[in-house]
Amino acid sequence: MSISLSVKTAIEESGNSRENLMSVLQIIRSDLGTLSPAILTEVADQMGLSRADVYGTATFYSFLETTPVGKYSIRICRSISCDMKNKNAVREALENHLFIKKGETTKDGMFTLTETNCLGHCHEGPVMLVNDEIHTELTPDSAVKIIEEIRIREGVDE
Amino acid sequence: MKKMKLYIDNNEVEVMEGTTILEAAQGLNITIPTLCHHEDLCIAGNCRVCVVEVEGSEMLSAACATPVSTGMRIKTNSLKVRDSRRTIIDMLLSEHAGECVTCQRSGNCELQTLAVLYGSPDNHLMDISIKTEPDRSSSSIIKDDSKCIKCQRCVRTCQEIQKIGALTMSGKGEHAKVSTFFELPLNTVVCTNCGQCVIRCPTGALVERTYIDEVWDVIGNSDVHTVVQTAPAVRVGLGEALGHDAGGRFTGQMVSALRKLGFDAVFDTNFTADLTIIEEGSELLNRLTNVIKGSGEALLPMFTSCSPGWIKFIEHQFPHLLGHLSTCKSPQQMFGALAKTRWSEKAQIEPEKISSISIMPCTAKKFEAARPEMNDSGYRDVDYVLTTRELAKMIKQAGIDFDKLDESECDSLLGKHSGAAVIFGATGGVMEAAIRTVYELVTGRPVPFENLNITAVRGMEGIREATLRIEGTVEKYNFLEGVELKVAVAHGLKNANAIMELVSQGSAPWHFVEVMACPGGCLSGGGQPIPTSPEIREARARAIYEEDESLPIRKSHENPEITRIYEEFLTDGPCGHKSHHLLHTHYTPRR
């Protein structure tokens, strides 16, 4: 779908006033991926808002990325419960496995690794979110296994 | 609305419902320190510097954001308040790159003032400020995030007063910052360079780009002939930057100071303001002639083109309406073009040896002077633009005792001016000056207003309209007999935006519209002394109109140097070939 059509559709679905902006951005994020300058310019123009205002709103929410991210966003919970259950070891295992550091994206554009605030699964920590899917009671090995399964699936798909 | 009685520091006070604690305290002459609060802007309540103790409440309240209630007992100076205030200021300082010895705002910084007054003598908090490279991309404004305290006055100014929204808060928590769209450099976004953010910034995070050193260099170079012009609003602002209250007029002392600084020729932008009236008035009459008598193709309403913030605004936001702008250059640029042609010829100095410097109440004028097309004489119209603040600084640097200066007058040829030129500095002034001249050209009689004061277009109302019935026309303009000339005046780009929406829809009833980018007009431009407030703007406006009434000539067309320039130099008349070449320009659509 073209940017302008996607934005138009999202606005038709959510409404065209400033309080609908977050919902519009959510829809577009899932339709088009990362919110690029071209996309946010289109949103601002179609909604009659300043471009900076739209950018400011998007950057407030970590799930509305404005910089390029991989096809799979891995978000490890950094809250205190997961921290006490050794989330750092999980993160390090993934960093070693993917050859990237926290905040980076793999060269093939497949995975981005970040930390996020509480995911609400404190009783099952450590946890991570891969796109919309939650993975609980992780160990370094189980986390790596989840990523490998995705890789295999992606390989088969292609 | 009902009245409410309350007690602040044991003083009884009665105020209307809805009044904030801060306002109630001001009524008792009790000062509560503030930072994010600004009279011109909506309440933000984010800096917390104004916290006070409300009896019965465990938490402290932000005085700027808390409405009073009946029987409230407030302490503004208790131990708890003093401790919290100190912690808040210490924390702001811990994040602020405090470069007070080099900062442009040092000595006039609200954070510095509060730090000295209320901060810890020995701030024990860790310095967590992050020094980042300032954005120096703009010809007008420098943005230094490491000095920003995130009060968001700039964001609110750009959004609420100007309806531009070039700035926003991006990120959150410790990563929150004042940003442009995708952190792009200021010179590539919709910023109009108006500088209203600069005069509301409490610190040195937003300042003008300064050219003081460059100007000292040309003054000191004996091979360069320096020509200086000062805009009308500078003379009613300069005093404030040199220790006087708002509302003082210092024209004569300013001229003396400019000579003492070493400028070779001291002239006045007011001269080209008068010239603008002749050129723009003629252009308006040409457009009216075309519409009423001729092909009907001229675009109306015609807009004034003096305010460079307004010009950039329309280039960005309403590029399809650029044809409505008068093609006249602003008085600053007209002056620059004449400095390197008419003055060059008369003084017998080659134009390449002339440096043209202007003193402006404006930051956008720096951008305007740098526009590539502004070199119709073959040389830059204007080489350097300084703000009123920068001139005040040069006067101090030179050790001049400003208050002891005798008054003196500008050099002749490009220095004489009418009262009509002076009022260019206030919103409505260009319109009033234009009407004084156009009406007289068309009817042969002065405008039918007491003492030439056209009060309908004066004042601080955001948009003002007036209608003037034209009767008793001279033969050349008899097609205007009985026509009702409809005009409008807007100041602040939010109001300009409202006008433009109507023009866009084709439902604007006016023939001629004056727009100034800054609230109050140039008198509160982004280059004027800091701070600004409604009271300060009123005081400067009073001074402008007093100056107008004090002058022997009140109409642009009666300025003898204007008559002379059309006799000797612009010999094919207003809007003639030579005028068009030197004094008119074109505009650039922008995204």
Image: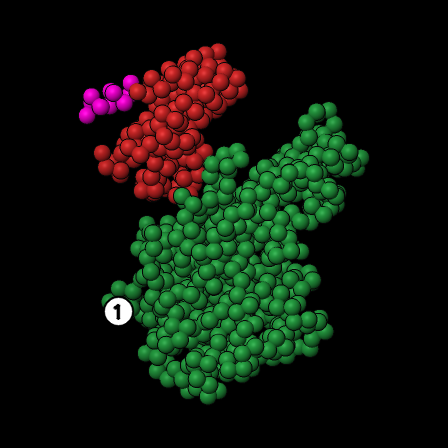
Chain colours: A red, B green
Q: In the drawing, does residue B89 fall left or right of residue B558?
A: right
Quarter occupied by the N terminus of chain A = top left
- Residue drawn at x 74%, y 37% is B82
Q: Which residues are magenta?
A: A149-158
Q: Secondary structure at mark 1?
A: loop
Residue sitting farthest toward the top: A123
Question: Can see residue B512?
Answer: no
Q: In the drawing, does residue B424 fall left or right of residue A15?
A: right
x and y percent of residue B348 in the render?
46, 88
Q: State the image quarter where residue A49 is shown.
A: top left
Foreground of the two, B348 or A62: A62
Magenta-drawn stretch contains A156:
yes
Foreground of the two, A144 or B116: A144
Q: State the image quarter where residue B585 is shown.
A: bottom left
Q: In the drawing, does residue B431 fall left or right of residue B295?
A: right
- Residue drawn at x 70%, y 41% is B123
x and y percent of residue B515 in the render?
45, 59
Q: Residues within 10 Å of mark 1 (few under 14, many from 20)?
A: few
x and y percent of residue A94 in the render?
39, 24
Magenta-drawn stretch contains B492:
no
Question: Please, what is the three-letter code of the amino acid marked with disc 1?
Answer: Gly
For disc 1, the marked residue is B294
Asked if residue A120 is positioned above or below residue B222 in the image, the reply reads above
Q: Chain of mark 1?
A: B
Asked if residue A132 is positioned above or below residue B312 in the image, the reply reads above
